[in-house]
Image: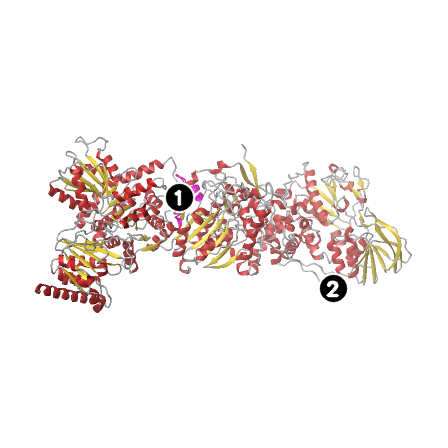
Amino acid sequence: MLKQIEGSRAVAETVARCRPQVICAYPITPQTHIVEALGTLVKNGDLNSAFINVESEFSAMSAVIGASATGARTYTATASQGLLYMSEAVYNAAGLGLPVVMTVANRAIGAPINIWNDHSDAMSQRDAGWIQLYAETSQEAADLHIQAFLLAEQLSNPVMVCMDGFLLTHASERADIPDQPEVDAFLPAYQPRQVLDPADPVSIGAMVGPEAFTEVRYLADQRMRQALELIPDIAAAFWRQFGRASGGLVRPYRTAGADLVVVALGSVLGTVKDTVDQLRDDGIRAGVLGLTSFRPFPAQAIREALGDGHRPRRLVVIERALAPGSGGIVTAELRAALADADGRSCPAGNPIISTVVAGLGGRPVTRKSLHEMLTGAAHGVLPPFSYLDLRTELAQAELARIRATRRSGPSAENILRDLSATAPGPQG
Amino acid sequence: MDKPFAITLDPGSSRANHTGAWRTERPVYGSFLPPCNNACPAGENIQQWLYDAEEGGAEAYQAAWRQIMADNPFPAVMGRVCYRPCETACNRAQLDTAVGINSVERFLGDQAVAQGWQLYPGGTTPRTPRCAPGNETPVAAALTREAGRGGGREVLVVGAGPSGLAAAYHLTRLGHAVTVRDAGSQPGGMMRYGIPRYRLARDILDAEIDRILALGVTLELNTTVTGILDVLTEQAGGHAAPGEGFDAAFIAVGAHIGKRAYIPAGDSAKIMDAVALLHRVEDGTAPMLGRRVAVYGGGNTAMDAARTARRLGAAEAVVVYRRTRDRMPAHDIEVTEALEEGVTMRWLSTVAHAEAGSLTIEKMRLDDSGFPQPTGEFEELSADCLVLALGQDADLAVLDGVPGVTFSGGTVDVGPDLMTGHPGIFAGGDMVPAERTVTVAVGHGKQAARAIDAWLRQASAEAPPRRALAGYDSLNPWYYADAPAAVRPKLDAARRAGTFDEVTGGLNGSTALFEARRCLSCGNCFGCDNCYGSCPDNAIVKLDAGHYVIDYDYCKGCGICAAECPCGAIAMVPEES
Amino acid sequence: MASERIRFYQTGSFAAGNRLLPEDMRSEQSSAARANTLTCGHRACQGCGEALGARYALDAVMRATKGKMIAVNATGCLEVFSTPFPETSWQIPWLHSLFGNAPAVASGVAAALAAAGRTDTRVVAQGGDGGTVDIGMACLSGLFERNDDVLYICYDNQAYMNTGVQRSGATPPAARTATTPAVGPEPGNAFGQGKNVPLIAMAHGIPYTATATVADLRDLEYKATRAMDFRGARYLHVLVPCPLGWGSSPADTIKVARLATESGLFPVFEAEGDQVISAARIRHQVPVTDYLRLQARYAHLFRPRERTDVIARLQAGADRNIARFGLLEEPDPDHSERVRLTPAPVHDSQLRR
Amino acid sequence: MFAVRFHGRGGQGVVTAAELLAAAAFREDRYAQAFPSFGSERMGAPVTSFCRIDDKPIRTREPVTEPDALLIQDPTLLHQADVFAGLVAGGYILINAARDFTALGLDDLAARHESGRLLTVPAASLAMAHLGRPLPGAPMLGGLAALAGPVSLDAVLAAIGERFAGQVAAGNAAAARAAFDYVTAERKELAGA
């Protein structure tokens, strides 16, 4: 049913249509609206499910591990510090091959504590063995959950649906919430691969030593490679059933014959697409490549999307998370992906890649800044690594302070002091 | 289900891992000698019959009784007159109080009499080992040979006392034809003529003797045996007419000649000896003793005489003894009961002179060596009669002049197999050097029977290897509930003087069962499952109650089973390297 | 019932089994048909108290639930020695996730069962003292507070044995561990305030809390069985000596546990809600030194010189327990050892909620 | 594309107002996007929210920096933050206030601004009158419908009816309608002048 609806609410109602049997939640901004809505649906009887209010994210993930191993379809949601706090259990769920589905309402990680959006949280778990899908819109966020349950249960592997905190979770948008029969038709009842059952007792979670651990990890990687096949199939099936393009591995936009392609994940893609349209109007042949699946990393799909023959001369990767001391997380993976399966670089030669760190801790990514930066890129003046809208004066002032005095005090607080002295930030 | 590799495993698959390889010591079920069995002069397997009795019910009681009967044909008598060395040795005494073995034995014996249990048909079956072989008593082993009485020979038993009758009993069951000859008019010897009725009811005694005779023992009463060699065959070193004589003889005529001591006495002084007194009471020809009776001596017979005197109507019965109570040979229980019945004691006193109606008593004192010395102080003690209870001598006439037979200190010299210096002639009971109790005598009977049987078969009595003693330290007593002993009812002291009724009563069904179940089963498995339950490696397999097997594939040798065995029936032994 | 009394007052009343008792009154461990939830071939040390305690408790629960049980296990010795690939010693559905999350995982299992309407299958979570008292405490408290239908069993061997005997929040004062070595003026673990998890559990007001040791099998089975009479969160704290970590003889594992209770150092009791309803009376009281001397982790209290001051403080602790739980009072008839004979399992319908 | 920026204080329903406007647009089968100036605002703290309305899907997610209309729900904010920043030339301003610009000290602004596009409406008092609580959200939307007409009054009323129920719905609707009439009258007057 088509609605004007808050992103969190859209996800909650869609998850409910997936009939999870056990839901665990611990509140953390900006995930709260999702679990509040689900909690209400359970309380008023619209959703027949066990809703556990646990005492921490660590418990939340642990409880869904137990429930999933007992044969229940399970769901939880978190963000930021919460994701890090449950990290040990996040790895464990994947190691045990349990098809848990979790929403991550992407948010920065402190210190300094920051409740606003970026991808630092999800990226910190990129090697936990979870499949990671990034939503561009509320609609896609909702749709991806339906696909996630199917994917997770077919592979016996957990799936993380990442949606930008506030930008998607708190934004009211038009979204089509599928009806129950449609979802039931698309998502069959969960058939567990392994289950705790007195009638057929097994021990789950054995200690595995050097004699088999490598093989276990190898098999985990194989599941990811299997996912590379399944994700497009499921997206296609979804399109057939619901008539919407949601999910898949990558989403190209005006890449055909493009000289400059912007690579990004999540909701920033919308703003980027608007900007690219402006660039086209300016006569710059720009395009966009959105990555919906970051784990598994769709190397092959990316190469195909960029075209095997004609390759864009320039790639600009928008990083919503920073790897201090290294730079861009997505960039590094993309660089590796551009070589073909045998590691040979493309005959047409590889493009020049620039990394642009943007939108950390909720800083708005504006068309204005993007347009400026990409125009520069088109004219070859964009450095290999840069920040979008970095307030250099603030940073420099603090650097000076540090150089000046040993006891310069906490940087974040210093910068805030400077800020209050100067003009208000971009958010007014 | 198609499980994830390595992470998920099939149940119980660790059985493939044989942890027994870790072991340096292995637990082994053993069977150790319980102190009660060790102390029993009659060699009863007390622990086994208590174990049998613990089950409760007629069937269990009969099984227990048969176990006693394997060693001792007088359970009911024992339950009355035995001085209970077993209870003195009982480990339970260190926990709370000793198990009332004697009272349970009496209960079982009385049950047998009341129910008229017979040995045949059926016969006793040897004990089956529960955990490990080696528990059978030699007698039980012999009983298994019982089948063919064919190899049987002729054996003469002289004396129908406890020792003789016990020998006859065992020899018969070993397949020999036994003839018992006794000078007296009734069988039982000292059991009848030495122990008063109030300690041993005669119907009980008769019943147990009859049961022995019922086995086919020939009893010839009022027959004094003289010239023993004339009745023995040549093989036994005798010269009886061919086909007439006996192949072996067991002499157990006891000791019932009262010791006389010279006591200056006036002509009209009334003096008699205790053995004769008790004998006459038994014959129903009790003498007139008068109002005041003095008994001279400090043994059990002295007590019997004094207590009997009270029952014959003596207003006063005074025991005159030259030492002190703690040096009295009489068993404490006898002294106590005597005092309860109003018998008075004169310690450190000797009779210097006897006159009609009065005695002259000389006070004594104990020297450093504890020997009584005269003090020269005298006093009068009015007494109508003086009964001498200064011990008994054996009448050894029956062995006079038998070649090879030697004597010392008024007793017959015998070897460890109770054979005298003359081949084929054995002796036991009060006439050989030993403690003079019914139980010891019964033990001699069994021992002699075994030895005679072996001698007749030109074999040597198989002396079983002595098992290690199961001391208190080998137990883990925490597992035993606190359970104070059940006491036997006693006849009210005031009512005793007038009657020869039994002073001590028996236990009833439940108190006897309670008492039997107080046994700690020292050194022998009683099927408590502790080993099975407490093995951290599930390495002990329980076949059925009380039957276990150790699975050495998994036993790591930690030793918990041995440490937690309540009765110390498991030993840890080093692995052969 | 005279016959009852005689049944009770007999050889080996406190032993695992007794041929004179009817089957249903014998301990589960005496039964040839016991579940052996933890079976042979596991890699626990010789004389492992935890292996013993786990089988005692879970076999009893198996009897109470008629075999319908799922177990969750925290990381630790029990998990490591029972399930090294490619073998497991468990014969029940068993799940190991992490060190600190067993209570939460169990909540999830219970929730899944409830969601599937399979409430006849019951959930047991188990862990060592580290996984319970320390790293698992938050999850455990959450389980208690929500009163999820889980029996949590802590096998307390008073240190991190799996990692090589380091101090845990359950390590008693003066005990030597790898991180509280027996050196310096005050060797061994410091005298802290301790962390009494059974009392913490009671403070949550959960339906049933109990302590037990491997030294009194019947009591342990009784409590594991009784716990299954309740719905909601239940807590069972079992003292399981560790020969390796305590420096005691493998053969003495049960003996040491027995002395811990007979000295008063480890009070054995049960509680409903926040009320203690029974305490196992000390049968033969012993001084704490009887207990301490058997363990190398306390050797420094006796050599080179006897630390009477430290021993006195430990004895005072035992005396406090004795006073607090009335461990030397006359047993009241309702809770005589006879009651400790494991009762027959109750039916689901009878369960208190 | 028509972009609106709402200014108010935590507790005044600033975010709700933006969502109601989006819902109204959805009613008219147009695309809309509403979102708050994300943060952990507390009661009384200055709050901003945004709403975009368009005939095609809206992809951009940046905050509204060049609004076509400003809805200022609390006149006390006027001289604090730069509430007028980025307003497009000829943009609309609606202020919740009973007083005129002079009283509000906005004469300069009024002078610079195209007549009829800068208005005040006593939204709070209208809400007080009809709803019983001084929540200016609904009346401000009613006023906006009259002032700039990005959505119709009917759409606003429908959105209100969808979001609220019973007395609350009725009260908000009445207040919105009253504000609509008030602004319509004001504009007539200005046009007349």
Asked whether residue D129 appears in the rendered view, the answer is yes
Viewer-proximal residue among A68 and D127: D127
Asked whether residue B120 appears in the rendered view, the answer is no
Up/down of B554 relative to C139, above or below: above
C248 left or right of A109?
A: right
| Mark 2 and mark 1: Cα distance apart in space | 75 Å
Viewer-proximal residue among A65 and A393: A393
Residue kind at label 1, given as amino acid type: Pro
Counting from the top left corner in percent of width and height, residue A71 is at: 32, 49
The rendered magenta stretch, by its main secondary structure, is classed as loop
Chain letter for the residue marked with disc 1 in the picture:
B
| Res. B457 image quadrant | top right
- Please provide the residue range marked out in magenta: C75-102
Counting from the top left corner in percent of width and height, residue C80 is at: 42, 41
Residue kind at label 2, given as amino acid type: Ala
| Res. B234 image quadrant | top right
Look at mark 2 in the image and give the residue it sits on: B494
Viewer-proximal residue among B208 and B290: B290
Q: Pick out the residue farthest to the left.
A: D192
Counting from the top left corner in percent of width and height, residue C211 is at: 49, 53
User: Could you tell me which secondary element the residue under label 1 belongs to?
Assistant: loop
Badge 2 and badge 1 in a common chain: yes
User: Could you tell me which secondary element the residue under label 2 belongs to?
Assistant: helix
Q: Residues within 10 Å of mark 1 (few under 14, many from 20)?
A: many
